[in-house]
Amino acid sequence: MTALENDRNLQKEPVQRMYDYYRKLKEQLGKYVAELHKPRDTMKRSTYEIQDLLAKIKVVPSIACLFPFNHILEVEQNHENKLIDLIEKISSLEVAR
């Protein structure tokens, strides 16, 4: 092996390490994105879909209350519709400060 060939091999090694590093990052990002798109609740919605619903509720006052379910992802469609209706009604109320 000549000195020039040896120098070229040394230059390839850091590039290969960087390539491997970025390939691994891309794999991890792909897994993360796949997790975000997995169905999460009883209606088989993804995290993105649930976040979209929450973002549409513009202003919600802070209210302490108990709900008839143990975990938010266990809510059935009819209960969710009732909750959204109630939240919208409460949000539209004018509150004296």
Image (cartoon, grey):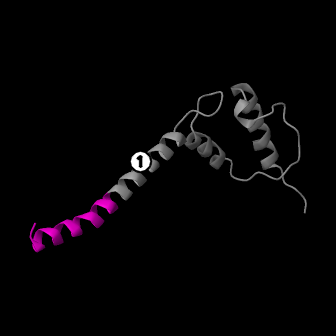
In the rendered image, residue 40, in percent from the top left (x then y), is placed at 61, 34
Q: Residue furthest left?
A: 2
In the rendered image, residue 59, in percent from the top left (x then y), is placed at 73, 53
Range shown magenta: 1-19
Q: Residue furthest front?
A: 1
Residue placed under numbered mark 1 in the picture: 27
| Residue at screen point 78% across, 49% down | 91
Q: In this rendering, would 15 be left or right of 31? A: left
**Magenta part, dominant SS:** helix
Which quarter of the image is occupied by the N terminus? bottom left
Q: Is residue 93 above or below residue 10?
A: above
Q: In this rendering, would 95 be left or right of 11? A: right
| Residue at screen point 68% across, 47% down | 57
Looking at the rendered structure, the kind of residue marked 1 is: Glu
User: Magenta segment: does it hold 5?
Assistant: yes
| Residue at screen point 66% across, 46% down | 54
Disc 1 residue crowd, few under 14, some 14–19, many 20+, Cα 10 Å: few
| Residue at screen point 56% across, 43% down | 48
Quadrant in the picture for residue 67: top right
In the rendered image, residue 9, in percent from the top left (x then y), is placed at 19, 65
Q: Is residue 10 above or below residue 83?
A: below
Quadrant in the picture for residue 45: top right
Q: Nearer the viewer, residue 20 or 6?
A: 6
Which quarter of the image is occupied by the C terminus? bottom right
In the rendered image, residue 49, in percent from the top left (x then y), is placed at 57, 40
Q: Is residue 67 above or below residue 19?
A: above
Q: Nearer the viewer, residue 19 or 34?
A: 19
Count of numbered circles on the image: 1
Q: In this rendering, would 13 be left or right of 67? A: left
